[in-house]
Amino acid sequence: MKTETEALFPRSLVVDIRLDDDLRYKGSIHDDVVARARGYKAALVPGAFVYGHMGRVAVEAWGLPWLERGGMGASFRRPVYNGDRLTISASALSGDADMRRSAIVVTNTDGEEVASGWIGLPDLSPSVPDLSAFAVLPRPDPPPAVSIGQLKPGAPLTTADRVLTEEEFRRSLSAFDEQHALHARDGIVHPGCLMRLAMGDTHNSFRFPSAIVLTAVEAQHFACVRPGQGLTTVGRIADAWVRNGKHYFQSEEFLRADGRLAARFLRTQIYGYENV
């Protein structure tokens, strides 16, 4: 007989992707006009949004416990376009008390796999890592420029040291079309928004030679975040390499809310391309 938790899986969620009107998208590949002029059918949806929608399956299944101590991972396989309808399918649970996982597959209306990964929940809260080796570093103006191939492991991340306002929180819920009561009623920041905040600190720690492309991410939550809290990111460039003419880096990011660790992200991104 299935346990109460096992009975929650398998499950699925259908999501209609709609990019919001964020001014940062104007003139970029995330703008319908620009994307179509370059031969795409519509604006390309940032991987952070696909990640955020994958997280909705975990919130709907596990609720508050997942926001407090859950984990997830995602790899992005194909472009997702503004207006796409995605089916997010979660398998039966596997694993043990350390992390009970469900495998995730995300497909578009053509049946193509656009992303995959997992969501998971440990029976107990995970141990909080020791962050004493990481300093809170204010963001320099301007940040240092990084040329292709010059980003080195160990380089520290800087932070904007900001407060998430109620207006920004509400905008993030609208951007993800998120209506779950834990977010809309109880004021808990959406997991997609958390990842975007840490990602923003990483991307603004350097001046990169080209737009960043997110290819994979793993996350572990340690506490909920609410608007009005002071947010800082500490961390480092964990690795950097080149493969098939593409320059990658991996960033390890620890997002803290009022000094308390809220989430850890390990993200893999492309930051430059070899000249052809």
Image (cartoon, helix red, strand yellow):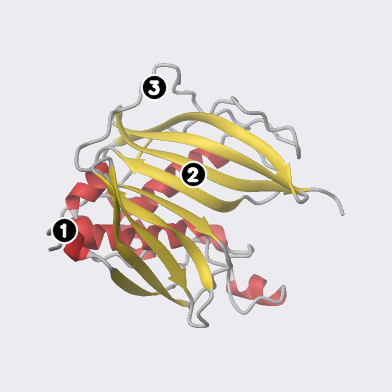
The disc labelled 3 sits on which kind of residue? Answer: Leu
Q: Residue at x 53, y 29 (%)?
A: 236
Q: Residue at x 65, y 48 (%)?
A: 270
Give yes or no for contact between labels 1 and 3 (Cβ–Cβ under 8 Å): no
Q: Give me the C-alpha separation between circle 2 and circle 3.
A: 18 Å
Q: Give me the C-alpha separation between circle 1 and circle 3.
A: 32 Å
The disc labelled 2 sits on which kind of residue? Answer: Met
Residue position for label 1: 185
For residue 2, above or below residue 270: below
Q: Residue at x 65, y 51 (%)?
A: 211
Q: Secondary structure at mark 2?
A: helix
Q: Position of residue 43 (x, y in %)?
A: 58, 71
Q: Quadrant of the C terminus?
A: bottom right
Q: Toward the viewer: 88 or 3?
A: 3
Q: Position of residue 109 (x, y in %)?
A: 48, 82
The disc labelled 1 sits on which kind of residue? Answer: Arg
Mark 2 / mark 1, whichever is N-terminal: 1
Mark 2 / mark 3, whichever is N-terminal: 3
Residue position for label 3: 131
Q: Secondary structure at mark 1?
A: loop
Q: Secondary structure at mark 3?
A: loop
Judge the density around disc 3: few (<14), some (14-19), many (≥20) Cα neighbours within 10 Å.
Answer: few
Q: Residue at x 25, y 42 (%)?
A: 69
Residue position for label 2: 199
Mark 1 / mark 3, whichever is N-terminal: 3
Give yes or no for contact between labels 2 and 1 (Cβ–Cβ under 8 Å): no
